[in-house]
Amino acid sequence: MTRQVELAASTDNAKSCAARCTFVVVGAGYTGTEVAAHGQLFTDAQVDRHPMRTGMRPRWILLDIADRVLPELDERLSRTADTVLRERGVDVRMGTSVKEATHEGVLLTDGEFVDTNTLVWCVGVRPDPLAESLGLPMERGRLLVDPHLQVPGHPEVFACGDAAAVPDLENPGSYTPMTAQHAWRQGKVCGHNIAASFGDGERRAYRHKDMGFVVDLGGVKAAANPLGVNLSGPVAGLVARGYHLAAMPGNRVRVAADWLLDAVLPRQAVQLGLVRSWSVPLDTASPELARVPGKPGRTEDGEAGHRAQSGRGGEPAKNQPGGEPAKNQPGGESAKNQPGGEPAKNQPAGGSARRRTGGEAAKSASGGDAAENAPGGEAAVAPPSDQPPPGPDVAPGPVKRTDRFTEGDS
């Protein structure tokens, strides 16, 4: 969201700005409702600090095939959440979903096409497919277990969390929902019962009675019904924050302090991006020019690297990595005691070196005539085989370094 708002603020193209400022959320359950509520507040605060040149404002659309927001909760909680969302400007559309998603936007089931760069999918969860491969009784992709979290007929097999269909003893005939709260509690019971199967203690059934529900809508707004009492507004907000704080396994003081500071200070937005090691190798003369998957190396003026006569890879270049007549440079044939010098001993990049600096047959190195995947080489840049190429607008993350070699490499 931060990146899209910043890019929208820097463009004069109204269509591009509108697409970057439009956020489509599919699924009006817990997750989708809270994402839309908090997201609208967050992006509005960002635009207030960095106004759009086109004068546009962020647009949030919440979709669901259900007939109301939070369909799994009490109707009064649903009405509270719906009112808060609409007051903030969220476009709530019930009975509508996404028919098709493309790079340009999404096509809705009502026939409208929405230009957007951001689609947030919050429609349910899916059990791990591994469970189906076991050949045991299933319930909508989940392993059927008894209240003790054991598979009937296979007392040695335990299952809990999203992978298990656990009977809800408080609501006979139904199963506990796939939520983190149930998974966490079931894990404790499962561990106890596994120990009991070895003679340490007695088995116990999983039973949990809900104390109510809370939905944090951001700011001081929330919807909650603790012990069956329906609340809204700041009081519900206090209950929601208090519940979440109590449910945290630790670090409560720091989180509470952050909430207090957010209440009196403007919100900060920071985005951190990481670059993979192969994108900016250590043996390049211009580390500020990152390699791009599927594209040849480029110089600062946009010309292809292999056409620049004084840049990396240019055959007549002097004093450049890979220039044949160059002396005392990586790759110079006559260079002594330099990476790539043929007579040099105990130096990296001997004549038959692969992936080293300056060897004529070197691969993925700057300046080698036959070099591939290097800045300035004619061949397209590609990431190592063990690293998936990053997609568009995705900051690649850290991976295992490929620019250092271990003993035994030739």
Image: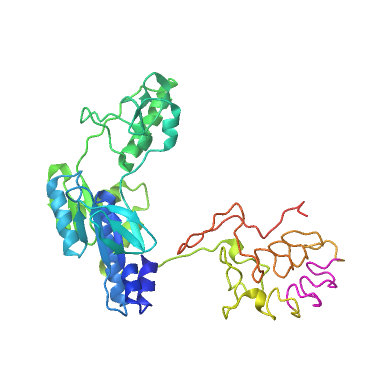
Would residue 321 appear left or right of 246 to someone viewing this image? right
Q: Residue at x 35, y 72 (%)?
A: 16
Q: Is residue 27 above or below residue 270?
A: above
Would residue 377 appear left or right of 253 to someone viewing this image? right
Is residue 377 or residue 228 the one in the foreground?
377
Furthest-right residue in this view? 343
Is residue 60 or residue 178 the one in the foreground?
60
Q: Is residue 188 above or below residue 248?
A: above
| The C terminus - image quarter | bottom right
Furthest-top residue in this view? 153
Quadrant assignment, res 144: top left
Q: Is residue 90 magenta?
A: no
Quadrant assignment, res 156: top left
Q: Is residue 124 above or below residue 204?
A: below
Would residue 185 appear left or right of 331 to someone viewing this image? left
Q: Is residue 285 above or below residue 140?
A: below
Q: Is residue 235 visible?
A: no
Q: Is residue 379 visible?
A: yes
Quadrant assignment, res 129: top left
Furthest-front residue in this view? 111
| The N terminus - image quarter | bottom left
Q: Is residue 325 magenta?
A: yes
Residue 310 in the image: state x and y as whole percent: 69, 81
Give the tally of numbered discs.
0
Q: Residue at x 32, y 62 (%)?
A: 258
Residue 133 in the image: state x and y as whole percent: 45, 30
Residue 268 in the image: state x and y as whole percent: 35, 69
Is residue 397 or residue 267 the one in the foreground?
397
Q: Residue at x 23, y 62 (%)?
A: 219
User: Is most of the magenta stretch helix, strand or loop?
Assistant: loop
Residue 254 in the image: state x and y as whole percent: 35, 58
What is the span of residues highlighted in magenta in the rendered image? Answer: 320-342
